[in-house]
Amino acid sequence: MTDYPNVAGSKGPAETSGEAACEVDCARLQRMVLRTIRRAKKAGRTAEECAIALRLPRVSAQPRTSELKAKGLILDSGKRRINRSSGKRAVVWVAKEYSQSVAAEGGGQ
């Protein structure tokens, strides 16, 4: 999709994926996810932590982190935390304005 990351993307040939992407209010969800990451300051948040804080399904928050990363608004802090739902390690995202302080502490990439 040529408008990515400003509109939700879709994967695969199934028309249902594209239909679902068209119904996502991408800009609003991106603002919400970015706001919750910024509020965490240099501690950052995983996509799952964003979803929990915003009371959204993880599948609504997770893609927004990819879009925000593509826009250069958030960065991988280099830290990992365990997702409660899966028990697996997840990227801790920080807002661009906090990336230097995280890197200075040895957490950034």
Image (cartoon, rainbow, N blue to C red):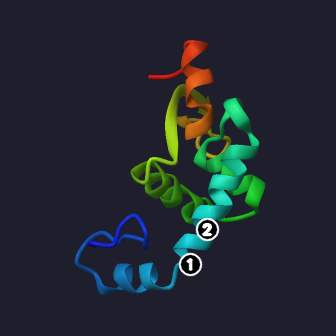
Question: Quadrant where the C terminus lies?
Answer: top left
Q: Is residue 95 visible?
A: no
Provide residue 2's location: percent of width, then percent of height: 26, 72
Q: Which residue occupies the foreground of this view, 86 or 51?
A: 51
* Residue 78 visible somewhere in the drawing: yes
Name the residue at the left extreme: 13
Query: How far, Cα to Cα, is label 2 from label 1?
Result: 6 Å
- Relative depth, front residue between 64 and 31: 31
**Residue 85 in the image: x percent, y percent?**
64, 46
Question: Which residue in the protein does label 1 denote?
Answer: 25
The reply to whether discs 2 and 1 touch (Cβ–Cβ < 8 Å) is yes
Question: Which element type, helix, strand or loop, lies under badge 2?
Answer: helix
- Label 1's element? loop
- Three-letter residue code for mark 1: Asp
Residue 96 occupies which quadrant of the picture? top right
Instruction: Quickly name the residue at label 2.
Output: 29
Which residue lies at the image location 64% right of the left edge and 57% below the top edge? 33
Q: Are there few (<14), some (14-19), or many (20+) residues within 10 Å of tag 1? A: few
Give percent across and percent down for residue 51. 67, 56
**Left or right: 84, with 61 as reference point:** right
Q: Residue at x 56, y 24 (%)?
A: 100
Dot 2: few (<14), some (14–19), or many (≥20) neighbours within 10 Å? some
Q: Position of residue 77 (x, y in %)?
A: 54, 29
Total number of numbered discs in the rendering = 2
